[in-house]
Image (cartoon, grey):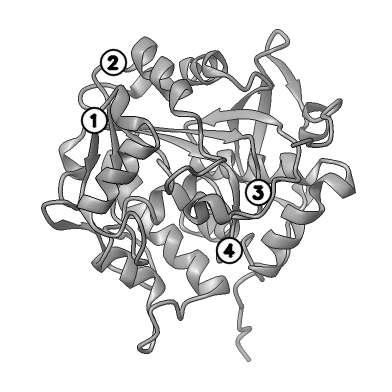
Amino acid sequence: MATVQTAPSGAAYVPYAQREGNESIVYFTRDLSPEGIIRAYQRVKGNISGRVAVKLHTGEPHGPNIIPPAWVKVFLERELPEATIVETNTFYDGDRYTTEQHRRTLEVNGWTDFTTVDITDEHGTVMLPVRGGKWFTEMSVGKSLPDYDSLVALTHFKGHMMGGFGGSNKNIGIGCADGRIGKGMIHAKDGNDWGVVKEELMEKISESTKATIDHFGKRVVYLNVLRNISVSCDCEGVNAQPVVTPNIGIVASTDILAADQCSVDLVLSLREPDRHAMEERMRTRHGYRQLSYMKELGMGNDRYVLIDIDHDDARITPKEAVVGVRPFRS
């Protein structure tokens, strides 16, 4: 009788010792500042060239936890003066649902003070192929996204109400899918706009991400900023749950799975009271399935070498990285 293999439970975290395969390089700094972002980016920027898109979550009006626009301003001025921030409209009806609403929100949050933002689905959509997926053969993204040569995913790592956590995978998979078609393909099921949850949602997000990063090939890098880590996504804006997880630092890699896996490992290496909220959010939403499915899709490695760029490029463990991290105080 043939053995039927089932997908790993997204509620189950896989310890490092149980992972298999090659290792990727992940760089780490505790320096949560524009300079920290710059130093981390400089370690991974080798293949970034041409017309560069910077994908980040620009936030709901007055969102308290987004990467500070002032930090992004310095980063762009020093490293990517010709780059463009890219976004898409939302699937939910709110302050970024239409392009007009979205542009008002960008102004409120200060992004228009120093840059322009390309809302890539403003003028339509385009399909990118999904290779090797089980849910999709193609994914709908903003029409102008393929006009760029390189992609920098500058991600605020945090929790997520449905995805468990929002790292580079969520930033790209949801954030590059256009507001009506692509996000609907990911979220909608059986007439319910938000019917997809748990393993299926994590897998669909990952397949959407794969369409985008396959398009950019080697010209894509990932920076996760582990600061103001609420269990809520930045899409909840001022209604986000209070931040109770300590600030940790910034990770950077050319491997999306390694970047997100390391970010999760760092959070779970905190003391139990400090990690409790995020651990519960990731487990109950089956968020770990993002990681195992990215590995199944060949999107990267969940094993990595963690390089401490604050201390002579020493090789460290996530546990060593969070030594001395203080409990969050608002």
Location of residue 159 in the rendering, given as x and y in whole percent from the top left corner: 62, 53
**Regarding mark 1 in the picture, which secondary structure is present there?**
loop
Give the mark nearest the N terminus, 1 or 4: 1
Residue where numbered disc 3 is placed:
230
Q: Is residue 27 above or below residue 245?
A: above
Residue where numbered disc 4 is placed:
161
Q: Residues within 10 Å of mark 2 (few under 14, many from 20)?
A: few
Location of residue 30 in the rendering, given as x and y in whole percent from the top left corner: 69, 22
Residue where numbered disc 1 is placed:
116
Q: Is residue 128 left or right of residue 297?
A: left
Determine the CA span between mark 2 and mark 1: 12 Å
**Regarding mark 4 in the picture, which secondary structure is present there?**
loop
Location of residue 66 in the rendering, given as x and y in whole percent from the top left corner: 51, 39
Determine the CA span between mark 1 and mark 3: 28 Å
Give the mark nearest the N terminus, 4 or 3: 4
Which quadrant of the figure has residue 145?
A: top left
